[in-house]
Amino acid sequence: MSEENKTQEIQITMPQEVQSGKYANQMLVAHTQEEFILDFILGTPPAGVVNSRVIVSPGHAKRIANALMENVAKYEAQFGEIKTVAVNMPAGTTAH
């Protein structure tokens, strides 16, 4: 195996304050040439709050999308089709 094909194992830790996660029921996505911005929102009418923002490279955004699609397919194979509903957002924005 060449030097460039070797994988390096990385130790990953999860800080205590991150372990409980953040619940989001909406997401806004924006992008520039260099990055994708994912804003996770907890929408509770009549308002909502961005409770987490994740900024990733275009390549990583594509890997995230692929990983999500793979896991949605596995979920649906086990539990059945996931039903989606439309989300109402202010004019000029797109939510997912």
Image: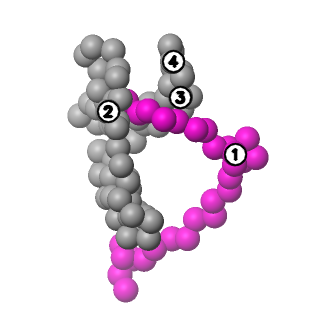
Magenta span of residues: 1-29
Residue at left 35%, top 20%?
Answer: 89
Q: Residue under label 2, please give it.
A: 86
Which quadrant does the C terminus fall into? top left
Q: On the image, which quarter does residue 38 sit in?
A: top left
Q: Earlier in the sequence, mark 1 or mark 4?
A: 1
Local SS, label 2 = loop
* Residue 7 in sight from this viewpoint: yes
Q: Residue under label 1, please give it.
A: 20
Q: Is residue 36 magenta?
A: no
Dominant SS of magenta comes to loop
Q: Is residue 72 above or below residue 53?
A: below
* Most distant residue in the right direction: 16
Going by the numbered disc 1, the residue's amino acid type is Ser
Say which of 11 and 91 sits in front. Answer: 91
Local SS, label 3 = strand
Going by the numbered disc 3, the residue's amino acid type is Leu
Local SS, label 4 = loop
Q: Earlier in the sequence, mark 4 or mark 2?
A: 4
Q: Is residue 12 left or right of residue 38?
A: right
